Image (cartoon, helix red, strand yellow):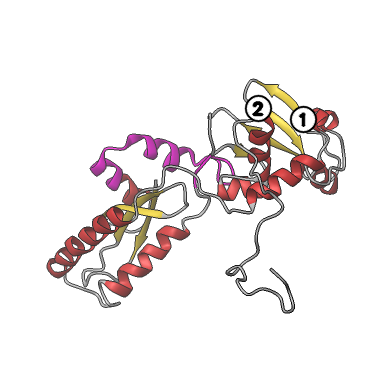
Amino acid sequence: LAIDCTYKITTNELPLVVFGTSDLHRHFRPIGVCLISTDESAETFKTLFRGIQVNYFEREWLLKLPFWYEGAAMLTPSTNNGLESKNGKIKQNYTMRQKMPISAFLQTAERMLNDWSLNNEKIPFATSITYNNDVDLKAFEWLQKIDKSQIAQLNPFTFIVPSNDPKINVSTWVQQLNSADWQSFDEFVRWSSSARLLNCSRFLLPWFCSCRYGLKEYSCIHAIGLMMMWGTMPVPQLIGKRRGRGRPKKIKLALQQD
């Protein structure tokens, strides 16, 4: 759940709270709006939570405030850029960057929510991962390059795989993971870039991977490569021999006989 206040909406200077969530394509999907009579503080969000009766978010995100870092929560965005973009569109497309009386804004808000609902019908909420066509090729190349004996299993669902350019072997990587005894930041960087941690508790993608693409895009060459190795994802027949961009030539070469 992403929540943020935007201002300069009504002549009464009441902040408008916009809240929603993000799908697996990392697109922000608004759920609703709420006018609050207080400023942008914890009390503002508490009022909203009481209105929608979501005690979980009040306890976890307002009181404890844990895990404010990339990859702390699987399959959730690490920024509220989508929500901030939606706030900008509210002012650009609906209030025309003018402060409105509450009575007029409520009519505008009804039209805005109706537009959001219609847009959700045109673009359904993404519940599955789609990835770039070149990812499977890169995953196959990574799988051919690495030493498969270096793939380690920590538990039934957690695996350690070597990176493209490992500086240490996987056994040493696991030892340092358990001890967390790095003498310098450079040593930590060398460790973190030598292997990737994957969680395969889900049968299909998305899987958690500690690489930057796995954290940002919910899919990466390491997860897809493991699925290819296990046979749960087919290797394309013409992998590495794909036709280039553009239409194929239909004109034969000069002086060529049939």
Q: Using the image as rendered, state which of residue 145 and residue 155 is in the foreground.
A: 145
Q: Using the image as rendered, state which of residue 71 and residue 199 is in the foreground.
A: 199
Direction front: furthest residue: 258
Image quadrant where one finds the C terminus: bottom right
The span shown in magenta is 47-76
Secondary element under disc 2, as helix, strand or loop, is strand
Exactly how many numbered labels are in the figure? 2
Secondary element under disc 1, as helix, strand or loop, is loop
Few, some or many residues within 10 Å of mark 2 (<14, 14–19, 20+): some
Residue 36 appears in view = no
Relative to 179, 234 lies left or right: left
Mark 1 and mark 2 in contact (Cβ < 8 Å)? no
User: Rounded to the nearest whole Å, what is the CA distance between mark 2 and mark 1?
Assistant: 11 Å
Q: Where's residue 35, x and y in %?
A: 24, 58
Amino acid under label 2? Thr
Amino acid under label 1? Ile
Image depth: mark 2 or mark 1 in front? 1
Q: Where's residue 167, x and y in %?
A: 87, 43
The residue located at (51%, 54%) in the rendering is 79
The residue located at (46%, 46%) in the rendering is 24
Few, some or many residues within 10 Å of mark 1 (<14, 14–19, 20+): some
Q: Which residue is identified by label 1?
A: 151
Image quadrant where one finds the N terminus: top left
Q: Which residue is identified by label 2?
A: 158
Query: Is residue 162 one of those drawn in magenta?
Result: no
**Badge 2 or badge 1: first in the primary sequence:** 1
Q: Where's residue 179, x and y in %?
A: 79, 28
